[in-house]
Image (cartoon, rainbow, N blue to C red):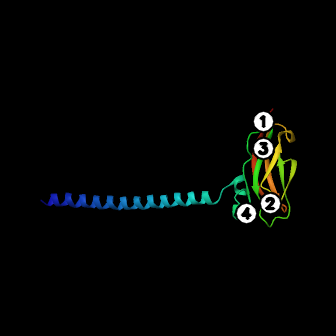
């Protein structure tokens, strides 16, 4: 009988150890889930690269992707500038960063059209510069005719 009590006591110790291990694993899972949720929120709140420059809609600025993209004849870029902007223009750059063209932007304007004759076929970046500050940058593709 004493042997049976020892076996039962050993089994109870094993069960207690397993229960403690399960509790620790549940805590680790919860911590990992919290970290994943925090990373997802951080990713949504803090975009990176070019898109980070385009996330200024809270101040009255926005710039949409050019449509159509790619284009051969002409493309249109919709935008809005904050009322506080004194002067603005759109600059077009090649992928090496060389500025190829500038287009003045009207205060209160809502779109800008760029002709396919202005640029050779290729990939370009375009930026809105308002009062000397880059407000947003996006990519566009000019296709061959």
Give the CA distance from mark 2 to mark 1.
30 Å
Q: Quadrant of residue 1?
A: bottom left
Q: Position of residue 75 (x, y in %)?
A: 78, 43
Residue at the extreme top of the image, as rendered? 145
> Can you identify the residue that label 3 sits on?
75
Front-most of residues 86 and 3: 86
Indicate which label's residue lies in the foreground, 3 or 1.
Answer: 3
Residue at the extreme bottom of the image, as rendered? 84
> Can you identify the residue that label 1 sits on?
143
Using a 10 Å C-alpha cutoff, classify the residue at mark 2 as few (fewer than 14 neighbours), some (14 to 19) or many (20 or more). Answer: few
Using a 10 Å C-alpha cutoff, classify the residue at mark 4 as few (fewer than 14 neighbours), some (14 to 19) or many (20 or more). Answer: few
Give the CA distance from mark 1 to mark 4.
32 Å
Indicate which label's residue lies in the foreground, 1 or 4.
Answer: 4
Q: Earlier in the sequence, mark 2 or mark 1?
A: 2
Q: Name the quadrant of the C terminus.
A: top right
Tag 1–tag 4 contact (CB < 8 Å)? no
Give the CA distance from mark 3 to mark 2.
20 Å
Tag 4–tag 3 contact (CB < 8 Å)? no
Q: Earlier in the sequence, mark 3 or mark 1?
A: 3
Question: Element under label 1?
Answer: loop
Mark drawn on residue 108: 2
Front-most of residues 51 and 36: 51
Q: Earlier in the sequence, mark 2 or mark 4?
A: 4
> Can you identify the residue that label 4 sits on?
60
Question: Is residue 103 depicted above or below 130 in this figure?
Answer: above
């Amino acid at each position: 009988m004493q042997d049976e009590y020892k076996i039962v006591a050993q089994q109870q110790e094993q069960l207690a150890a397993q229960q403690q291990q399960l509790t620790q694993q549940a805590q680790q899972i919860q911590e990992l889930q919290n970290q994943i949720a925090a990373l997802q929120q951080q990713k949504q709140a803090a975009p990176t690269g070019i898109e980070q420059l385009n996330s200024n809609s809270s101040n009255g600025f926005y710039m949409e992707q050019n449509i159509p993209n790619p284009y051969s004849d002409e493309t249109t870029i919709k935008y809005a500038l904050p009322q506080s902007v004194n002067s603005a223009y759109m600059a077009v750059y090649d992928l090496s960063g060389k500025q190829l063209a500038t287009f003045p932007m009207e205060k209160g304007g809502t779109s800008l059209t760029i002709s396919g004759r202005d640029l050779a076929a290729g990939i370009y970046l375009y930026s809105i510069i308002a009062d000397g500050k880059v407000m947003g940058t996006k990519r566009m593709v000019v296709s061959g005719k």
